Image: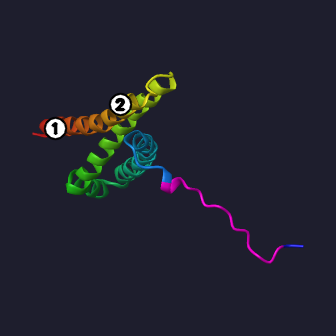
Amino acid sequence: MASARPTVRPLSPHLSIWKWKVHMAASIFHRVSGNALAFGALLLFGWWLFAAASGKEAYATFHEVATGWFGMLVGVGLSWMFWQHLLGGVRHLVMDGGTGYDLKTSKTVATLVFVGAAVMTALTWALILMKGN
C-alpha cells in the first residue's frame, strides 16, 4: 500500500558548497565555446552558402550585414570562442597527460586561457582591420 505522504528527498547541496573558480569556469567555457562554434559555423556558413546560391541581391544583403557592425560583433564573438576553445583544449590535453592538477598550476593555466583568448582575439582583429585598409 502506497504512503499518503509524499517522500521528502534531500536536496543536492552543490549550489551552497561549490563556488565559481577560474579553473571550473575554464572547463565550462571550453564546452560552451565548442557548442557556440558549431552553431555559429552552421548559421554563418549556411547563410553565406544560401546567399551565394540565391543570386547577387541575396549575396549583397549577406555581405552588407556581415561587414556591418553586427557582422563584426558576431565575428569578434566567434573569434573569441575559437581561441577560447583552442586554448582550453590545449589545457585539457595537458591535463589528460596527468600534469597541471595541483591547485596553483590549474588556476594559473585557466587564467592564462582566458587572457590568451582575449589577447589572440584582439591580435586577430587588429590584423583583419589592418588588412582591410
Left or right of 54, for residue 14: right
**Quick check: 122 above or below 4?**
above
Under mark 2, the amino acid is Val
Q: Which mark is residue 98?
A: none
**Quick check: 46 above or below 128?**
below
Instruction: Tell me the quadrant of the picture where the N terminus can be found.
Output: bottom right
| 12 is within the stretch colored magenta | yes
Q: Which residue is drawn at 23% across and 36% down?
A: 119
Left or right of 114, for residue 21: right
Q: Which residue is drawn at 12% across and 37% down?
A: 130
Magenta residues (range): 3-16
Badge 1 element: helix
Residue 41 position within the rendered picture, expressed as x and y whole percent measured from the top left: 40, 46
Left or right of 31, for residue 12: right
Residue 16 position within the rendered picture, expressed as x and y whole percent measured from the top left: 49, 56
Q: In which quarter of the image is residue 61?
A: bottom left
Residue 6 position within the rendered picture, expressed as x and y whole percent measured from the top left: 73, 73
Nearer to us in this view, 6 or 123: 6
Disc 1: which residue: 126
Badge 2 element: helix
Sequence-wise, the earlier of marks 1 and 2 is: 2
Disc 2: which residue: 109
